[in-house]
Amino acid sequence: MGSSSLTSDERLAWLRLIRSENVGPVTFYRLLEQFGTAKEALDAVPHLAKKGGRKKAIKICSRREALDELEQLDEIGAKMVLRDEATYPPLLAHVEDAPPILTVRGHEHLLTKRAVAIVGARNASINGCKFAAQIARELGQGGLLVVSGLARGVDGAAHAASLETGTVGVQGGGVDVIYPKENTTLYNEMVERGCVIAESKMGTRPQARHFPRRNRIISGMCRAIVVVEASPRSGSLISARMALEQGREVFAVPGSPLDPRSKGTNALIRDGAHLLEGAENIFNVLNDLQNIPLKEDKNVYFQGGKTGLPAEDELVEGRTMITESLSVTPVCVDEIIRQCQISASIVQTVLLELELAGQLERHPGNKVSLII
């Protein structure tokens, strides 16, 4: 990855496209792949949505709205970093649904450092927070960036302990929205000495559905993720699962079987996570991995040129068959291609149409399902 060669107009078009209705990261990249530029993709979206069965006009982010967002970012000293720019987190760029744009507040050069995530319970024990802080401090002293989610408990302890050496907080809402309010002082220190990033538009209030998406960024930025304390149904375990799907290393801190906050971490260890007793465990594993590059997913990013849309008669033939092969249960896109025996470009185009029409949902692992 190098510095972006995009014009200011195309950068604005990227922002407009990702802020438009029903356009998620994977759809964004598919559109770029087919149309070559975000500007051309924006022109094509209404037509595609209509073909997918959309009755009312799809909401496209206007040029004015995008310019307003950039002005608001500028007012608080924040900026946007695109996926193909030099300061975009390098490991995150390998993730299938990496955000096309991150909004960044603070020291953006930190985003390119080798990173480890530390996550855990919001209602963490005193010992849990103390251990998270100790690990964060030692990782920082060893030259690693500490990434977490700016939540109370383990997250806050890890951030506070690594302010001196480098820490990044990934927001569930907009980059300007402090959540929880009790972390106001920490948030301000992070902006001053570390870095805060977000995928959502400025002013977005964090909601429960935002956090799994936030967690994929936390794990995606890092070579490894540390889970300190986690109940069996906690968001930290979602982060650990995403880390495994992304090919990252997972470390878990063992705890008493009597403490519900240890049930999640003990289960991770039982399922094969590295048992963590000290930072040296992490350094040993990362040193062994240093010369092994992460495998880049194929067909994820637009790399230049454009494939264009298949012929309309081919699409008409394929639409019924592809739609009939879908249900509310997620199915792999490759399986649809095999089952229907239709070219990948036709399948991808029909799926694009359905998603833009609001009838299709994408899931991790290149899976899709119908929205009923």
Image (cartoon, grey):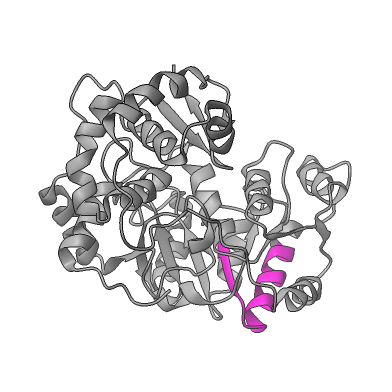
In this view, the residue in front, 99 or 218, is 99
- Residue 293 spot, x, y in % from top left: 64, 71
Q: Residue at x 56, y 41 (%)?
A: 364
> Is residue 138 depicted above or below 319 in this figure?
below
**What residue is drawn where x is 23% and y is 26%?**
50
Q: Residue 162, image x and y in percent?
A: 58, 74
Position of the N terminus by quadrant = bottom left
Visible residue check, residue 100? yes
Q: Is residue 262 left or right of residue 367?
A: right
Q: Which residues are magenta?
A: 130-148
The residue at the point 65 percent across, 83 percent down is 141
**What is the x, y in percent for residue 207?**
44, 38
Q: Is residue 339 left or right of residue 276?
A: left
Residue 365: image quadrant is: top right
Give the percent coordinates (x, y) of residue 316. Answer: 32, 23
Residue 182 drawn in magenta: no
